[in-house]
Image: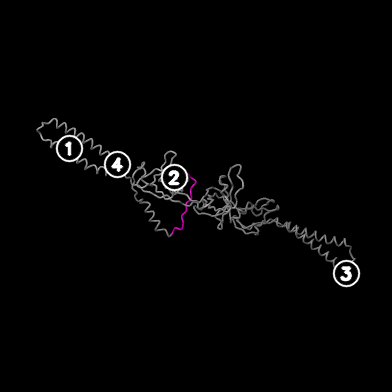
Amino acid sequence: MFTRTLFTQTMFIQRVTERARSACDISFKSQPHNLPKAPLIAPLTFLLASLFTLTPIAVSAADKIDVIPVTVEAIQETAFADIVNEVGKINAIDSAILNFNASEKISAIHFSNGDKVTKGQVIAEQDNTKAKADLDKAKSTLALAKTKLERIEDLLIKEPFALSKQDVDELRENVNLADADFRQKQATMNDYLIKAPFDGQLTSFSQSIGSQIGAGTALVTLYSLNPVEVRYAISQKDLGKAQKGQKVNVTVEAYGNKVFNGLVNYVAPAVDESSGRVEVHAALDNPEFKLAPGMFANIKQFYSNDIKHLLVPQNSIIANNDERFVWLVRGDSAVKQVVKLAQNTNDGYAVVTEGLAEGDLVVKTGMQNLKADSKIKVIQDKSAADKATVSSANSGAVEALSAEPSTEGAE
């Protein structure tokens, strides 16, 4: 730039000098020979001296105009987690629809809607008057059969041939039959009870005390709420990445940004034919029963960690149709560099896959005035300096920083 400016000034001086000489020659020819030539030469000398004096000032001014102030930032490598964001639903791992196995009236309900129960507790009972009478009858029949057998056995001790072996066998068989009938009637009594098959929480009861309810008719549902399970589906292109034991973070609308942690416990071995996606389940600890079956959930599944990527400030990226480029600092000049981008990080940066290396300095502000081989002057980025000061003051409170790329591409 300096050479071009100096060349222009030199050409201008030469033209002025030539015209001045031509003017002097004309003046000399038109003047009488007896007049002195010095007064004509003096203005020419002054003009040339002024031009040579002003030339350095003009060149210096041009240099100041052509130097463009910019702020820069170094390209850094950052560790990422390879994650996928999906939407799913909370489900109970264990759930049971509870019903009676007999048709009778409900005689007792020992819990209220929504109560928590433990395994083995009796939740509701039916009127079992008839069944209990049958049990008592079977119990008496069994006792009578045992008494008869005992008497015969005592008699046979005294008189071994008092009764035939066949008659004794029939008595013993009668005891066995009476015992089986008693146990059957005893088991039937459980048909009139509903017991909790596991620890959990009840829903609302469908009927109340005194209602006639048939065998197999649902009375209430029991859910086991700790742990619970979130179910969702991922793209089939991620089937090779998803594995049991991978970490998931779950949020639900009811609790804002509170994160519930879990682990993948099921990845479908095949792609669903109707949706073209792969079903995934993850178990979540839920000791406070905050997560309820049926809730919609936002899921982040972590496929892997510590994936290295280069980051470039989004402010540095310039779009030209489908091309993306940045201005690289090379000495005191700026050089255009085409880049290829991946996803945004949602914090002012984009992942760059080609065109830059770690440590490269890219122009962050001031690039609107740049062109090929522009001269630049790097100035301090005040906002970055203030941010660094705050970060330094709070460094003791920060344990770790992590970046998680979004699924959106850089614009």
Magenta span: predominant SS is: loop
Q: Is residue 211 toward the left or the right of residue 63 in the image?
A: right
Q: Amino acid at mark 4?
A: Thr
Task: Identify the secondary structure beneath mark 1.
Answer: helix
Q: Say which mark, if any, is on residue 355.
A: 2
Look at 29% across and 44% down and name the residue there: 63
Q: Earlier in the sequence, mark 2 or mark 4?
A: 4
The residue where tag 4 is placed is 3
Around disc 2, counting alpha carbons within 10 Å, would you say few (fewer than 14), some (14 to 19), or many (20 or more)?
A: few
How far across and how far down the image is residue 257, in percent?
49, 53
Q: Is residue 6 toward the left or the right of residue 297 in the image?
A: left
Please provide the residue range marked out in magenta.
397-411
Q: Earlier in the sequence, mark 3 or mark 1?
A: 1
Q: Are marks 3 and 1 in contact (CB under 8 Å)?
A: no
Q: Say which mark, if any, is on residue 44.
A: 1
Task: Identify the secondary structure beneath mark 3.
Answer: helix
The residue where tag 3 is placed is 158
Q: Earlier in the sequence, mark 2 or mark 3?
A: 3
Task: Identify the secondary structure beneath mark 4.
Answer: helix
Is 398 one of the magenta-colored residues? yes
